[in-house]
Image (spheres, rainbow, N blue to C red):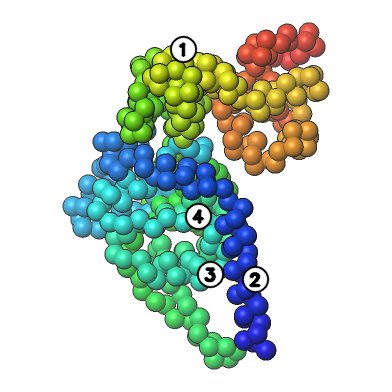
Amino acid sequence: MAIISSDKENKKHKAKNSARENVIPCETDYDRCFENSIRPQTFDDYIGQSQLKETLKISLDAAKQRQESLDHLLLYGPPGLGKTTLAGVIANEMGVNVKITSAPALERPRDLIGILMTIKTGEVLFIDEIHRLNKVAEEILYPAMEDFSIDRTTGKGQSTKTLRVPIPKFTLIGATTKAGALSGPLRDRFGIIHRLEFYNNTELSCVVKRTASIIGAEITEDGASTVASRSRGTPRIANRLLKRVRDYATVKSDGIITKDIAVKSLNLLKVDNQGLDTTDRDLMKLIIENYNGGPVGIDTLCAALGEDIRTIEDIYEPFLLQLGFIQRTPRGRKVSPAGYKHLGCKIPSAQQSLF
């Protein structure tokens, strides 16, 4: 019976994987390959985050001189700023391999144990979305990070024994968009903690020009600056917009990305001069038109927009807050005067006294 049950489970597992492979479009694999092809490999090629790079260089040089592994590192900040890329750069600078995974993929204890048991001395283990680790995985990580060992249980019932198995010294790099969601014991085990900041337009222009040179797209200074100014301070978005602008330039022009071509293509994509897209504007218009400018609760906004809380809080709100277009209050979200002005809306007299 046990064998039959196992076979059924295997068939279900294969069917599920097969269905998943059929559902995932080819573009996902292409986008992943594209991102990997443009990732910098060294600090010299990594654009932006100057203060962070300087601090990490010192830590890396010190670790090399002592012939030790780098302290465990926690990187946090909005998505798309280069946390995964930075992990690859650190591993390359240390001359070691990097194992990349994400917390949701580590559902079972054996998933994480299998990685830790095969890791080699000095290697880097990168865990994305580390704030989503389950409690069992966290408990496994504690001795691995602190004592470089794994506690394994053998036997059953009264004969159960816990064995502490040593593992090679390694560097764990955790990435998260919600540092506050990490448990205290896990956060305290990181020796280095850094926040990644949004990029300015000058840095993003350099990112756009570098990517353009890699993919063979010809772009002018004004063209790169235009794409950068509408990229929400995020390299991942800048690279994504560059691909769409390149397509437009190829079809509608001579293939050269000028300021005029960039403006026309981005307007076609409904990305305005501040980098806001349709959803951003719909979010602010909803607060203004349906709730008199706010405040309104996040649950109400999610229901009205058809988006989940995590999408709004992680993707849309950070940039709108940075621009000062919306405000968070104890009673909910509301649109600021700057938000009204950007949308070309008049501030109601009842709202003016609140600002």
Pair 1/4: label in front:
1
The answer to whether marks 3 and 2 mark residues whose Cβ atoms lie closer than 8 Å is: no
Of the pair 307 and 3, the residue shown nearer to us: 3
Q: Quadrant of the N terminus?
A: bottom right
Disc sitting over residue 113 in the figure: none
With 193 as the anchor, is 62 left or right in this view?
Answer: left
Disc sitting over residue 102 in the figure: 4
Distance in Å between CA atoms under marks 2 and 4: 24 Å
- The kind of residue tagged 3 is Pro
Distance in Å between CA atoms under marks 1 and 2: 53 Å
Q: Residues within 10 Å of mark 3 (few under 14, many from 20)?
A: some
> In x, y percent, where is residue 140?
49, 67
> In x, y percent, where is residue 99?
39, 58
Vertical side of 99 occupied by 60: above or below:
above
- N-terminal-most mark, 3 or 1: 3
Vertical side of 193 occupied by 201: above or below:
above
Q: Is residue 47 visible?
A: no
User: What residue would you read off at disc 1?
Assistant: 260
Q: Quadrant of the C terminus?
A: top right
Label 2, secondary structure: give it.
helix
User: What residue would you read off at disc 3?
Assistant: 109
User: What residue would you read off at disc 2?
Assistant: 12
The answer to whether marks 1 and 2 mark residues whose Cβ atoms lie closer than 8 Å is: no
Distance in Å between CA atoms under marks 3 and 2: 21 Å
- The kind of residue tagged 2 is Lys
Q: Residue at x 81, y 23 (%)?
A: 290
Label 1, secondary structure: give it.
helix
